[in-house]
Image (tube, helix red, strand yellow):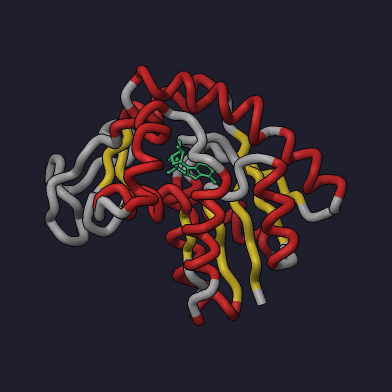
Amino acid sequence: MHRIVFLGPPGAGKGTQAATLARSLSIPHLSTGDLLRGAVAAKTPLGLSAEGHIRAGRLVPDSLVLEILGERLARPDAGGGFLLDGFPRNLAQAEALAQRAPLDVVVAFELPMDLLMTRLTGRRTCPKCNTVYNVVTQPPRVTDRCDLDGTPLVQRADDRPEAVGTRLQVYRTETEPLFQYYTTQGILRPIDATGTPAEVASRVRTAVG
Ligand code: AMP
C-alpha cells in the first residue's frame, strides 16, 4: 500500500507530479487546495468560510481543512492508499494525520525561491479538471485552453503577486518545520525539484521506491 505525502513550497510542481504518480500507482490524488476550491465554487458553508483565507494566501483554519479531508479520506478509494498534495501544512495537521493513518514516505520538493515566483505567477489552471500549465515553462497546445477538455484556463486568485508573497511566508513559518518532523521519523525523501516535469518525475519515482 502507498501512503504518500508531497511536501514543498507552492509552485514547486507538487500538483503536476502528484497527478502523474497517482495515476501510475492507481491511488487517489488528494489535494486539499483542490478540495477547498471545489467547496468555494460550490458555495458550501465550508467553502464560504474558507474563501477569504485562500484569496489572501493564508492557511485555512485546521478545523475546516481536517473536515473536508476527513470526508475525502473516508471514501472507499482512499482505503488502499493515497497521495496527499498540500497537506499537512503545519504541525497540528501532521499530528492529526498521524492519528488517522501511518505514512510510508514524504517526498520533499526542493526549489530555490526565485524559481517559485516565476512558476507561481506564470501558472494557469483548468477550472474543470485542475490540470496545471505555465505560460512560460509548460504552455498548453492552444493558448489559454486546456489540452484535455478545451476549457479556458484561469489564473488562481492566490497566484496574483499580492497573495504569492504571503503564501511563501506562511510556507516558511508554518510548513517548513515539517521537514524536521518527518526527518525525525525517518520517512523524509528530499528531491531536487528543478528541471523539466519528466526529470522531476523520475526523481519522484526513485524517492517513492
Ligand atoms: P494549494 O492549491 O495547495 O496551493 O492551496 C491553495 C490554498 O488553499 C492555500 O494557500 C490555503 O489557503 C488553502 N489550503 C490548501 N491546503 C491547505 C491546508 N492543508 N491547510 C490550510 N490551508 C490550505
Q: Using the image, determine if residue 117 lies above or below residue 66.
A: above
- Residue 53 placement, left or right of 70: left
Depth check, front residue: 152 or 199? 152
Position of residue 61 measured from the top left corner of the image (x, y, whole percent): 53, 40
Which residue lies at the image location 56% right of the left edge and 49% below the top edge?
Answer: 63
Q: Using the image, determine if residue 8 lies above or below residue 43.
A: above
Q: Quadrant of residue 70?
A: bottom right
Depth check, front residue: 105 or 172? 172
Q: How many marks?
A: 0
Position of residue 132 measured from the top left corner of the image (x, y, whole percent): 33, 47
- Residue 56 placement, left or right of 86: left
Which residue lies at the image location 27% right of the left edge and 59% below the top edge?
Answer: 129
Position of residue 75 measured from the top left corner of the image (x, y, whole percent): 49, 76
Quadrant in which the N terminus appears: bottom right
Q: Using the image, determine if residue 192 lies above or below residue 45.
A: above
Which residue lies at the image location 59% right of the left edge and 40% below the top edge?
Answer: 8
Q: Using the image, determine if residue 19 lies above or below residue 178.
A: below
Q: Quadrant of residue 99?
A: bottom right
- Residue 144 placement, left or right of 116: left
Depth check, front residue: 4 or 204? 4
- Residue 160 placement, left or right of 58: left
Which residue lies at the image location 25% right of the left edge and 35% below the top edge?
Answer: 155
Q: Quadrant of residue 54?
A: top left
Quadrant in which the C terminus appears: bottom right
Position of residue 197 measured from the top left corner of the image (x, y, whole percent): 45, 48
Looking at this view, name the residue that lies furthest to the front.
45
Residue 199 can be seen in this image: no
Residue 63 can be seen in this image: yes
